[in-house]
Image (spheres, rainbow, N blue to C red):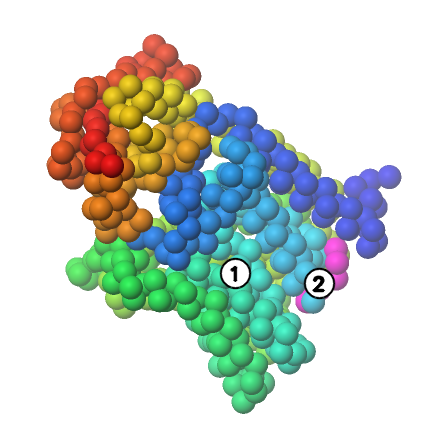
């Protein structure tokens, strides 16, 4: 019995999908966790460091991914954020499969779902749960809910679309891009324009605003820090060449992330010269608008505004890639080899995790520059906790420093002190001058050219205590990590 036979029928398709989901969950949780000494950069600096403060927003982003990182870390320890990330990915696969079942037979919906694994964003970047990964299932949920709302006109689907949009707004503002794509699709034909004469879209808007309302209040109270950060992070290209080059570069980078998916689609006999569906085909137009629209819209906004783009911002834009390829190649469905597809996916489940290990562990070790997941966080936490107890007769409640270094140390301490990010009240509104004076702070910085603390960490009353060297856990013969430290004594 060959693989094509095993995957035939509803039970075979369901079994194959479940095995695929379990492999994604197990491999991409266990492999990164097994090689990690510390946690990834975004998980620490933009996740746990923020999440423990349970704010309705942070100076870079809305709060959702920080809350989730903190919750999973508290519940499960180091493996928690790795598991969380893969739960987001497999939720995306499930939603894509369910959407596919509305457009095509189960076998083809499975093919479309499996093809997603060959999109770069669904493998190597996934162990680092950040705002981009957190958006994956929310974009897929928005697409699925919108499709169902159009098909059935039932208010529960419009409500679900509003919930997805609201949760997306609490995750990253780029959620607005898929909303633009949805609106563009709704305006694209006489049939879909009819929805604006119904109550559904307005219920979706109301629910989404209701979900993000606490964050909007936080934005107003804190003078919109996320907007300032986004503008600074994106940069601005006033020159004509740069304004043209940046969106083109972004589009090219997004095409590159899907090249492996295209190769697999060709190899299994799916992607071949064939007549495309008619533009009047509602499903095809839906997939064009929501599958390609977000990338085009993002590039257009960059071209118009001059704001720069980051390649990884494209992460959630390609949820529908597999569905679009499969649906576009409808005449090729009978000729697709499931045996070849499963062989490709099986091989990629070996090759891509190996590439991850090479890129994040072995490669940096050979170059003598440890990756972010190989920092001596426990050693630092143990050493500075002892020093604080030796010099200060109170609990360590605040650590000042950059979000990465101070966050690593705080993460490994039982009492989980607050991080005073860059000693900035703007970046750390949970710290006030009164709290700092009352509780004091441990101040840490990485020593590079000079042992003196950076100007931003030169707090009033700071007593510089010296420096400590920490061997790299997997590179003990390399130059150690040098950390300067000091104390702002508490005044209790």
The answer to whether residue 278 of the structure is visible from this angle is no
Residue pointed to by mark 2: 101
User: What residue is rendered at 42% in x and 17% in y?
Assistant: 474
Q: Residues within 10 Å of mark 1 (few under 14, many from 20)?
A: many
Residue 80 at what x, y percent from top left?
54, 38
Residue pointed to by mark 1: 139
Q: Is residue 15 above or below residue 371?
A: below
Instruction: Answer with the quarter of the image where residue 409 lies.
Output: top left
Residue 335 at what x, y percent from top left?
73, 53
- Decide whether residue 272 is among the magenta residues: no
Left or right position of 32 against 307: right
User: What residue is rendered at 46% in x and 25% in y?
Assistant: 37
The answer to whether residue 76 of the structure is visible from this angle is yes
Q: Main secondary structure of the magenta part?
A: loop
Looking at the image, which is closer to me, 379 or 465?
Answer: 465
Query: What secondary structure is found at the residue carrying circle 1?
Result: helix
Residue 237 at what x, y percent from top left?
21, 58
- Decide whether residue 105 is among the magenta residues: yes
Instruction: Answer with the quarter of the image where residue 276 lies.
Output: bottom right
Left or right position of 162 against 364: right
Residue 378 at what x, y percent from top left?
41, 23
Looking at the image, which is closer to me, 14 or 238?
Answer: 14
Marked residue nearer the N-terminal end (1 or 2): 2
Instruction: Answer with the quarter of the image where residue 24 lies.
Output: top right
């Amino acid at each position: 019995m060959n693989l094509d036979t095993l995957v035939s029928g509803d039970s075979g398709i369901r079994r194959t999908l479940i095995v695929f989901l379990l492999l994604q969950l197990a491999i991409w949780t266990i492999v990164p966790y097994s090689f990690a000494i510390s946690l990834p950069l975004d998980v620490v600096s933009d996740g746990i460091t923020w999440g423990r403060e349970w704010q309705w927003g942070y100076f870079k982003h809305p709060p959702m991914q920080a809350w989730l990182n903190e919750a999973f870390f508290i519940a499960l320890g180091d493996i928690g954020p790795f598991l969380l990330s893969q739960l987001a990915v497999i939720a995306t696969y499930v939603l894509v499969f369910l959407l596919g079942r509305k457009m095509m037979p189960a076998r083809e919906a499975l093919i479309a779902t499996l093809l997603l694994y060959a999109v770069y964003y669904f493998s190597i970047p996934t162990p680092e749960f950040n705002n981009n990964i957190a958006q994956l299932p929310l974009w897929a949920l928005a697409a699925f809910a919108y499709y169902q709302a159009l098909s059935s006109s039932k208010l529960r689907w419009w409500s679900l679309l509003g919930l997805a949009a609201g949760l997306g707004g609490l995750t990253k503002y780029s959620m607005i891009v898929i909303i633009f794509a949805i609106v563009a699709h709704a305006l694209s034909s006489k049939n879909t324009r009819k929805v604006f004469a119904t109550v559904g879209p307005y219920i979706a808007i109301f629910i989404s605003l209701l979900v993000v309302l606490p964050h909007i209040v936080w934005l107003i109270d804190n003078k919109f820090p996320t907007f300032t950060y986004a503008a600074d992070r994106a940069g601005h290209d006033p020159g004509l060449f740069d304004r043209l080059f940046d969106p083109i570069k972004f589009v090219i980078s997004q095409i590159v992330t899907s090249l492996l998916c295209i190769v697999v689609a060709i190899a299994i006999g799916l992607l071949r010269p064939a007549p495309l569906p008619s533009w009047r085909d509602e499903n095809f137009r839906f997939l064009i608008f929501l599958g390609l629209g977000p990338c085009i819209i993002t590039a257009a906004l960059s071209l118009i505004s001059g704001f720069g783009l980051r390649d990884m911002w494209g992460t959630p834009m390609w949820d529908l890639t597999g569905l679009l390829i499969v649906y576009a190649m409808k005449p090729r469905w009978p000729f697709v080899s499931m045996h070849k597809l499963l062989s490709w996916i099986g091989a990629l489940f070996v090759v891509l995790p190996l590439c991850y290990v090479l890129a994040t562990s072995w490669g940096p070790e050979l170059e003598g520059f440890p990756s972010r997941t190989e920092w001596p966080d426990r050693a630092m936490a143990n050493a500075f906790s002892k020093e604080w107890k030796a010099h200060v007769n109170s609990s360590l409640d605040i650590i000042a420093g950059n979000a990465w270094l101070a966050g690593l140390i705080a993460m490994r301490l039982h009492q989980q002190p607050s991080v005073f990010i860059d000693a900035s009240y703007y970046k750390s509104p949970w710290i006030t001058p009164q709290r700092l004076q009352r509780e004091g702070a441990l101040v840490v910085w990485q020593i590079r050219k000079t042992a003196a603390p950076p100007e931003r960490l030169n707090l009033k009353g700071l007593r510089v205590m010296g420096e400590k060297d920490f061997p790299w856990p997997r590179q003990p013969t390399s130059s150690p990590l040098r950390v300067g430290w000091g104390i702002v004594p508490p005044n209790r």
